[in-house]
Image: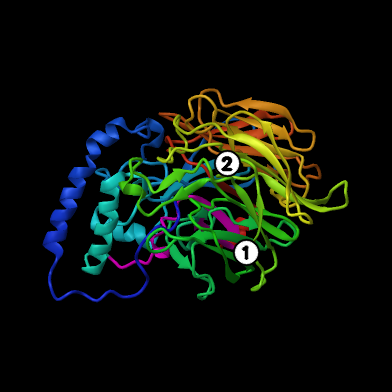
Amino acid sequence: MAGAAYSTSTQGSVVMSQTDHRPALEQEEQRIDAEMDLETQHAKSIYNVPGYRPVRGELSHAPVRITGSVPADLDGAYLRNGTNTQFEDSKVRLHAFSGAGMIHQIQIQDGAATYSNFYVRTPRFEAEREAGREVYPEFSDLVAGKPGAQRLALIEKKIAAGMIPALGAFERTPGSTSIRYHHGRLYCLQESGYAFVLNTEIDAGSRLVLAGTGSLETWDGEWEGPFSAHPRINPENGDVYNISVERSGRIIAGQIHEGELVAQAAVHRQTADTGAMGWLHDFFLTDNYLVFPDISIRVAPTGLTSPEGSLFHHDSEYRMRWGVIPRLIDENAKVRWFQTDNVGTIWHVINGWERTGQDGHAQIVLHSPVFLSYPASVPIHTPEEPPAQVKTWVLDLETGEVVDDRILVDHGYERPSLNLGYVGRPSRYCYLLDEHGDGYMGKGVLKYDLIDEKAVAYHDYGGMYGGEALFVPRRGATDEDDGYLLDLLMDAERADLIVIDARTMTELARLHLPRRVPFGVHATWLTTEEIASLA
């Protein structure tokens, strides 16, 4: 996640005022910069560690040294998204969600590999590069107290004065959270705005060449709203499902957007009012439903001037609930709510599926990490983030009750992955990133059995930090765990792409990148056939 669309601007042209307010606004900006006290804030920030420092320069297919043996069938490209500010003299506070998007690409061909990296050149990126500083809201502004509120207000004044391009709320996406492939296109996603589709090229050596250029995508205006960083793909036909939440104006009631992407066309409708829900980062896809959490983190328009100095707050009285809506687009369908007995906040879910209970009732089974409390500062991927618990819930579709609500693993595991061919159907294995301990990213990965509810095996990252253990099936695989886990491991000075046998949880190969890589999370794998389709 990189925050919801918390902006007061709207799309469209801006009429210039007869009065030139620019000198006064420039003075106001200097005052706010001083009040931000960035030197002091950065010095004491929990994000001021080598892993969060950006890299400079972009490489294209630099050679990669390999130790171990890359499996013969593992030909393709690994791409991982993440934030990477483009300015040496940044004018915003540090946060995992603040900064421009950057893709790190490792392409493997016949046992050899190359590394590339490039900025995601959204309209926001280009406008800020032209300005020489950040000019649009960053997530860190939403947790920066009064200076953050002042900066948000100043941005709207500068747009009205014609000092910065009048990008609408959804046009301001940095595209910095995830990257997904669908029907011959690559999308950079961040749930505050539109999807950003990359321009792609295949060179004479069948290598994927990306420069980060592209365009915002609304599918001919059918999708007018933010697009999730975690769309769910139906493994049977490749259709993409999306749920995202839009905030407008003064951080009031949020509107759920539901949609389906078939081939390169979108079907879209708005559904329910979610009240003051803090974010909707991930959700479940089952045979007949989309299921999403209404979390205990809430937002308030006066939050930045509150003692916590954040738009977000944990409401210890707000019990988490599950929203269930039909998977098929139905203009008349209503969200059906299932109330749990506990507070909870969710970033990433594992898997869910439908079943018939012992009493013959139709049920939905859900699995996900959940945080029982969460700080208002939203210190994700740091030691200040509390440990999550892996839980299971069962929703009874006939009674409308949550008939099971249990902790499976009481340890700080998060950012789960699974064999995506099992999305929405009973799956045995998931792969949980171990964030317990110092809290910076993941120090290892646990293979967990959801059916027998037990740990299977653990792979330690040996002092490096991982972001997400991405499952890639072996070619021709028939078993659920017959494949590989890929994770981009990072420390202060180096980065490795590790290849793990998902069945045995043993390391097969390590690809040593020619430079360090900043902390980041979400990745995708492209097969050789998918790469060819991008030509």
> Looking at the picture, how far across and down is residue 25, in whole percent?
16, 59
Dot 1: what SS? loop
> Looking at the picture, how far across and down is residue 204, in whole percent?
54, 57
> Looking at the picture, how far across and down is residue 233, in whole percent?
66, 57
488 inside magenta stretch = no
Establish if 372 lies above or below 248.
above
- Asked if residue 193 can be seen in this view, the reply is yes
Left or right: 445 with respect to 397? left
Q: Residue at x 64, y 36 (%)?
A: 390
> Looking at the picture, how far across and down is residue 74, in whole percent?
66, 43
Label tally: 2
CA gap, disc 1 and disc 2: 39 Å
In the picture of the structure, the residue carrying the numbered disc 1 is: 183
Left or right: 13 with respect to 280? left
167 inside magenta stretch = yes
Establish if 402 lies above or below 459.
below
Magenta residue span: 165-188
Q: Residues within 10 Å of mark 1 (few under 14, many from 20)?
A: some
Mark 1 touches mark 2? (CB < 8 Å):
no
**Colouring mode (rainbow / by chain / secondary structure / one colour):** rainbow
Mark closest to the chain's N terminus, 1 or 2? 1
> Within the image, what quadrant is residue 159 found in?
bottom left
Q: Residue at x 79, y 33 (%)?
A: 452
Dot 2: what SS? loop
In the picture of the structure, the residue carrying the numbered disc 2 is: 343
Kindly identify which numbered label has been placed on residue 98: none
Q: Which three-letter amino acid code belongs to the residue tagged 1?
A: His
Q: In front: 342, or 375?
A: 342
Image quadrant containing the C terminus: bottom right
- Asked if residue 2 can be seen in this view, the reply is no
